[in-house]
C-alpha cells in the first residue's frame, strides 16, 4: 500500500544558513530540522510516498529499513501533531 502525505498549505520550508526551517504561517512558529528531518520534509514536498522517503533515509544515513521506517513514522506523527501536514 502506498501512503503519501502532503505539507500543510500554511507550512513553508525555508532554506537558511545551510539548514531547513519550517515556518507555520498561522502563528510564526518555527521548527528547525536536522538533516534527516529536512530530507523527509523535501520528500513530502516532492510527493514521495512514505516508503520511498524511508528507503532514501536508510540509504543516506546507513540505517536498516525497519529503523528508517519507524523514524519517518515518528517524525510524521510529530508534524501531524504540530498541524504541519495537510488533513
Image: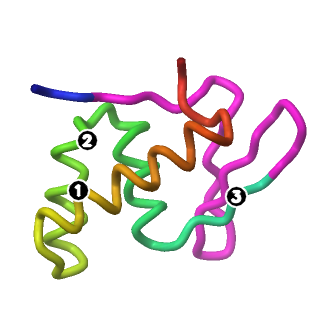
Find the distance from the CA under tag 1 to the CA under tag 2. Answer: 8 Å
Vertical comparison of 60 with 76: above or below? below
Vertical comparison of 37 with 64: above or below? above
Front-most of residues 65 and 23: 65
For residue 16, which quarter of the picture? bottom right
Which of discs 3 and 1 lies nearer the camera? The answer is: 1
Helix, strand or loop at label 2? It is helix
Helix, strand or loop at label 3? It is strand
Q: Please rate how many residues cluster around mark 1, counting C-alpha atoms within 10 Å: few if below 14, some from 14 to 19, many from 20.
A: some
Front-most of residues 48 and 54: 54
Find the distance from the CA under tag 3 to the CA under tag 1. Answer: 21 Å
Sequence-earlier tag: 2 or 3: 3
Name the residue that disc number 3 marks: 31
| Extreme-top residue of the structure | 87
Find the distance from the CA under tag 2 to the CA under tag 3. Answer: 20 Å
- Looking at the image, which residue is at 87% across and 44% down? 28
Labelled pair 1, 2 in contact (Cβ < 8 Å): yes
Name the residue that disc number 1 marks: 69
- Looking at the image, which residue is at 22% across and 55% down? 54
Q: Please rate how many residues cluster around mark 2, counting C-alpha atoms within 10 Å: few if below 14, some from 14 to 19, many from 20.
A: many
Helix, strand or loop at label 1? It is helix
For residue 44, which quarter of the picture? top left
Query: Residue 22: x, y in percent?
Result: 66, 51
- Magenta highlight on residue 21: yes
- Looking at the image, which residue is at 89% across and 37% down? 27
- Magenta highlight on residue 12: yes
From which residue to which does the magenta span run? 4-29
Which of discs 1 and 2 lies nearer the camera? The answer is: 1
Side of 1 relative to 43 (left or right)? left
Residue 50: image tag:
2
Labelled pair 3, 1 in contact (Cβ < 8 Å): no
Amino acid at each position: 500500500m502506498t501512503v503519501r502525505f502532503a505539507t500543510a498549505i500554511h507550512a513553508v520550508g525555508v532554506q537558511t544558513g545551510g539548514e531547513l526551517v519550517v515556518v507555520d504561517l498561522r502563528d510564526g512558529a518555527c521548527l528547525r530540522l536536522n538533516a534527516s528531518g529536512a530530507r523527509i520534509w523535501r520528500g513530502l514536498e516532492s510527493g514521495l510516498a512514505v516508503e520511498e522517503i524511508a528507503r532514501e533515509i536508510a540509504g543516506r544515513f546507513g540505517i536498516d529499513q525497519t529503523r528508517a521506517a519507524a523514524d519517518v513514522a515518528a517524525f510524521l506523527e510529530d508534524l501531524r501533531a504540530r498541524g504541519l501536514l495537510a488533513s
